[in-house]
Image (cartoon, rainbow, N blue to C red):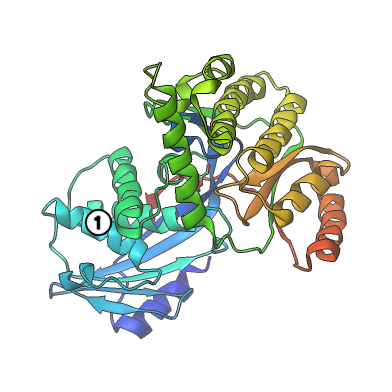
Amino acid sequence: MDIGVLEKRFEEIYGTKVEHLYFAPGRVNLIGEHIDYNGGRVFPCALSFGTYLAVARRDDQKIAFASMNQTFQVECDQSIFENKPNEWVKYPLGVVKEFSDRGLDSWGFDILYFGDIPNGAGLSSSASIEVVTAFMLNDQLNVGLDVVELVKMSQRAENVFVGMNCGIMDQFAVGMGKKEHAIALDCGTLDYDLIPLNLNGYKLVITNSNKNHDLVTSEYNVRRSQCEQALVDINQELNVKHLCDLSEEELERVRNLISDETVYRRARHAVSENARVNEAIDVLQKGDLVRFGELMNASHRSLKEDYEVTGVEMDTLAEEGQKLPGVLGSRITGGGFGGCTVSLVKEDNVQEFIEKLAPVYHDKIGLNAEFYVADIGDGVRKIY
Ligand code: GAF
């Protein structure tokens, strides 16, 4: 990112200089999908690309939002909370509202964003804009909250203001990521460990299907409520806080309590995915990348068959990708219904992977895939 371009654009829009610049990354999840809201363990990392936020204070009680990626821009006061626009600004606005609800409402900011995360690709562009906004407000208003608290506020903003009942994984990865590390996060307790990513000659390749994950909010919320239903059913006899507190054997023992077959399959995905994550974190630390890759493949299969969040585009990318030389594993990453896959590919085979997968995908689906070799970066921060 050429910061000079952002600074120049800021001056063009607001007629004043950027005073401070902040950055929050996107994220890629290696394994542990759709279990953050089931109290499971997930294994995401922060990326080196993300969202920049340039800001200057202004003298009135307004906030102006603009983005170099979007045409919609707005200058608003608190009345915007009642008439929120169905535009990208609902993400940062939800965060501003979280601060405002805590009495932290000394407004007066001109803000310009620039993001280099592909939008709608399941790499957490929304969490990135939320967390960078929370981090900036915390700093500018001298609130002194720690990053985990900002992460929680950002998740709440998305749940309450945007209406997407996401778990905490994305905001946590964006806030707490560390260069060359993945985060082993227990979403039930928020205990976490930073695990070094020693990939011994392998690379994480992100493939963007360019199929926008447009169903994500509605279908996502349905999946989440199905998991909640499974928990209610199971708790007729048990007393568990989260679905992922169950082992696979325990779930089988109480299977008859779940009357709806679809709800049972959703629960089976959650419980089996959690077991896969625990094993994946373990084998990665032992350097067993072959097993790690097998677990990635099994994760994709479970998301396809039991959770039904993949679709033909993502299945094509993952399943065709799994067959290519030097590929240990490939799976959908993020909420699903489009977005990206993440594949573990031998460094020497990365070019071949791209050259072979792109035409297969194009022939079958008619879309052009894009490829990024993941560069694992740090979490949210102030640049100046
Ligand atoms: C989306 C959500 F925002 C996350 O909380 C998580 O549930 C993910 O989908 C699926 O693992 O990115």
When the figure is inspected, residue 126 is found, relative to residue 301, above or below; the finding is: below
When the figure is inspected, residue 221 is found, relative to residue 208, above or below; the finding is: above
Residue at x 44% of width, y 57% of height: 126
Query: As drawn, is 344 to the left or to the right of 178?
Result: right
When the figure is inspected, residue 255 is found, relative to residue 88, above or below; the finding is: above
Image location (x, y in percent) of residue 279: 62, 21
Image location (x, y in percent) of residue 44: 54, 39
Residue 122 shows in this picture: yes
Residue under label 1: 137
Nearest the camera: 158 or 171?
158
Image location (x, y in percent) of residue 259: 52, 30
Residue at x 17% of width, y 48% of height: 143
Q: Name which quarter of the figure residue 168 lies in.
A: top left
Mark 1: few, some, or many residues within 10 Å (few <14, many ≥20)? many
Nearest the camera: 350 or 230?
230
Query: As drawn, is 107 to the left or to the right of 205?
Result: left
